[in-house]
Image: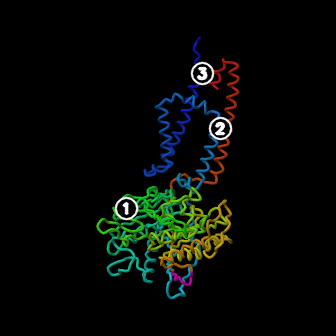
Amino acid sequence: MPHDDSSEQCNSKKSKKHVWAIGLLGVGSAIWFLLRTGWKPSRIAYPCQQVALTNIEVFKLMLLTAIPTLTTIRSTLSPLKPVGILVLLLVGSAFITSDSGIQALGFTFAQDTSDYNRIPIQLEENVALASEHTSDVFLAQNVTGVEGNVTPAISALFELMEIEGLHFYNTTFEPTGLIERDDVVLLKVNGQWTQRGSTNTDLVKAVIEAIVNHPDGFIGEVVIADNGQGLGRLNWPSANAFDNSQAVEDVANQFLDYNVSTVLWDMLRYDTVDDYDLGDFSEGYVRSSSWDADTEIFTSYPKFITDAGFYVSFKNGVWDNTNGFDSDRLKVINMPVMKSHFRYGVTGSIKNYMGVPQGYIVPSVDPGIPHEHFSIALGGMGTLMAETRMPILNILDMIWVNAHPMENSSLRGPWSTYSSASFTDIIGISQDPVALDYWASKNILVPTAEYLGYTEHSSLDPDYAPLSDQAFGIEEMDESFHNYLNRSRSVLADAGFQVTMNTTEMNVFVTTITPTTPTGTQPTGPGLQINPLMLAILIPISAILVVGAVALVKRRGLTTAAKNLDNPGHWSESCRK
């Protein structure tokens, strides 16, 4: 019987089509890899780049390796292909359009079209009626100068603080100051979100400049840190800055003559360790064995080795083998950005400490969110501050704020795009995180919301206790801003710290920088310009179209195959089609 090679020819052509498909995926991945990496090799470590490299490697293996069972596998799974494609695309759609997916893939929501016209807010000073147990709040407005320069504003604020008896520098002539020349100064920023959702890096740069310009000569180290609970990054390609390509790591690299470094505690949270005094010199998180029943939290804190070689315990200070812990040598400056928040109304100085704990120590009511996040409602961040380390200063970034209330707008925080943020151009400083959050939300965030046209903004009001109904999304608030702030205040007050939500116990000082319009080139942040809403619509539609096309082709193929069974002489013709 003569050998009929028509079937082999058909299978060969099908195999070639399969190679072509993977080839196109490999080529597309290579183009994406080159465009996304650009001139920054460090982006190779991004998740999307790693996926692209994997696709390229798969194609390379296809060219180099034959897989004998490929035809069999393909034939076996063939009926499931439409369903598989639909499931894959729908799951991919859900991931890509989710907040975590957008952050992980490094997509940017839109071009930076920031409006540098300041929201017209008139800050008023306040004199405490109480004679003792008062909190000082210092505010500066019109802080952004040419090329996003915030340094003059920070200098003016520190001078205002000194007039009122709070000295930034600890020197031979002023031993009551905050920062000594050999301190390890930890800047706790918000690094969880891209664009205006993270701490302004121009502000971070100005604070570092002030520290390293210590009158006695700075010989310590500045460490910029955060724990984004798996979403944190200190190298966002679209940053919160005048030059929106200036990430936190870029700022650190500008101070080569000093010890300035970054550490992402996200990378340490998988390792539970003991502190240095117990002989454990590995990096990781130290957990308390004591459960705080009132605020439902196990306190935890990071310990790590800085780039300059300092052994740092967030709770206990700087360690050396001769003298043990030096608690006074570690200074924490809390640097949040003020935003609305769809679970807690407002996020500021208190809630920024969610970037300190380990996370997921006990099972959470939501597997995707660490249990500590829910303890915020009970004052858990107050417990964390009281039992680990209270910041020496809270510097609240209000240069750009998200003032969209959760009960009215889908643009509410904690994420904040370039287009959804408002330019208030204000910085606030206080040693009392509660007073700072209260005053700023009441006198800056709420007026900004009103300027944007919102008549209902109770979720932003620190005096409003009930939960507000969320207009967008199915989630209910975990707790009102007023309630979680007040409970945090209570915890800190019980621990002996001066904190207040009472304006009669607040002294508010205001300095106004000579207004200038920020000028200069605003580089556009790299990354694919993408609209998440359009993705949410287009990807499922594309999935349905693809599955429909596949089903149609399959149906046509089955019809042709049936005809060929009746007429074997048509096999070759079938392949050509």
Q: Is residue 266 above or below residue 543?
A: below
In the image, what residue type sits under mark 2? Pro
The residue at 58%/12% (across/down) is 2
Q: CA distance from mark 2 to mark 3?
A: 25 Å
Label 2: which secondary element: helix
Q: CA distance from mark 1 to mark 2?
A: 52 Å
Is 397 covered by the magenta stretch?
no
Q: Tell me the quarter of the image containing the N terminus.
A: top right
Q: Which of the labelled discs sits on residue 306, or is there none?
A: 1
Q: Which residue is mark 3?
A: 7
Label 3: which secondary element: helix
The residue mark sitting in front, 1 or 3, is 1
In the image, what residue type sits under mark 1? Thr
- Which one is nearer the viewer's eye here, 87 or 278? 278
Q: Which residue is mark 2?
A: 82
Residue 13 placement (x, y as % from top left): 57, 27
Image side of residue 337 versus residue 460, left or right: left
Circle 1 Cα neighbour tier, 10 Å, few/some/many (<14 / 14–19 / ≥20): some
- Which one is nearer the viewer's eye here, 230 or 460? 230
Circle 2 Cα neighbour tier, 10 Å, few/some/many (<14 / 14–19 / ≥20): some
The residue at 54%/79% (across/down) is 500
